[in-house]
Image: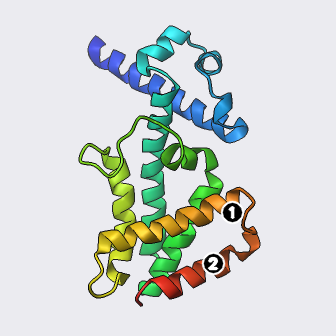
Amino acid sequence: MSVQERKQRQRTERERLIVATARELAEAQGWDAVTTRRLAERIEYSQPVLYSHFRGKREIIGAVAVEGATEMALAVRAATAAADGPRARVTALARAYLDFAERNPAVYDAIFQLDGGLAYAREDTPEPLKDAFAALLECLGEVAGDGVHPGLFTEVFWAALHGLATLTRAGRLPPEDTGARVELLVNRLAVL
């Protein structure tokens, strides 16, 4: 291995460590607790080393969002692949999405609530974000109904899921009724 390759590998490992540490800290104490000073202390590198990888917290949030979008897409695809039939797939998608949001609140916020400096719904949107939407579209496109654009249907269904996730987390909706809400959403919105 050349010196250049070793340095690049070490740089990549440091970036992963920074992102993983930011996620851990955000999940445990919220994003307000994530500062470059605390991250530098936790990873045992100086702040200038941290800044050599990320210009600041905003870019770190963006890196967490990209990583989280990849994980969400995998979770949705795994859940829908294991389901049999359109109704079961859409229900599995909804549950996987809401489960991801519940299990990873700080990551979910990084993807959908916080400014990570990422472009959404544009050509320059990072591929993992596009792929997370594609994971939803793959399943929801088949139940959009005649004359309904699959992408628009997916956006509306996704918006409903996001609303359920956000309102439940905020204590505005009782979590014990989540299953009934998913069934209502699937039965009333999707053409099965």
In the rendered image, which quarter is residue 166 located in?
Answer: bottom right
Residue 84 x/y as whole percent: 44, 85
Give the answer, above or below, for where 162 lies relative to 126: below
Q: Quadrant of the N terminus?
A: top left
State the SS at label 2. Answer: helix
Side of 116 relative to 35 (left or right)? left
Q: Residue at x 43, y 70 (%)?
A: 156
* Horizontal and vertical percent position of residue 54: 44, 22
Visible residue check, residue 3: yes
Residue on which the image places disc 2: 181
Dot 1 lies on which element? helix
Number of the label disc, if any, that sits on residue 168: 1
Where does residue 91 sit, x and y in percent of width and height?
Answer: 52, 79
- Say whether residue 131 is left or right of residue 94: left
Q: What residue is drawn where x is 57% and y is 63%? A: 163
Q: Amino acid at mark 1?
A: Thr
Please tell me which residue lies in front, 84 or 73.
Answer: 73
Work out how far the residue at label 2 is from the one at label 1, CA to CA, in angstroms: 11 Å
Q: Amino acid at mark 2?
A: Arg
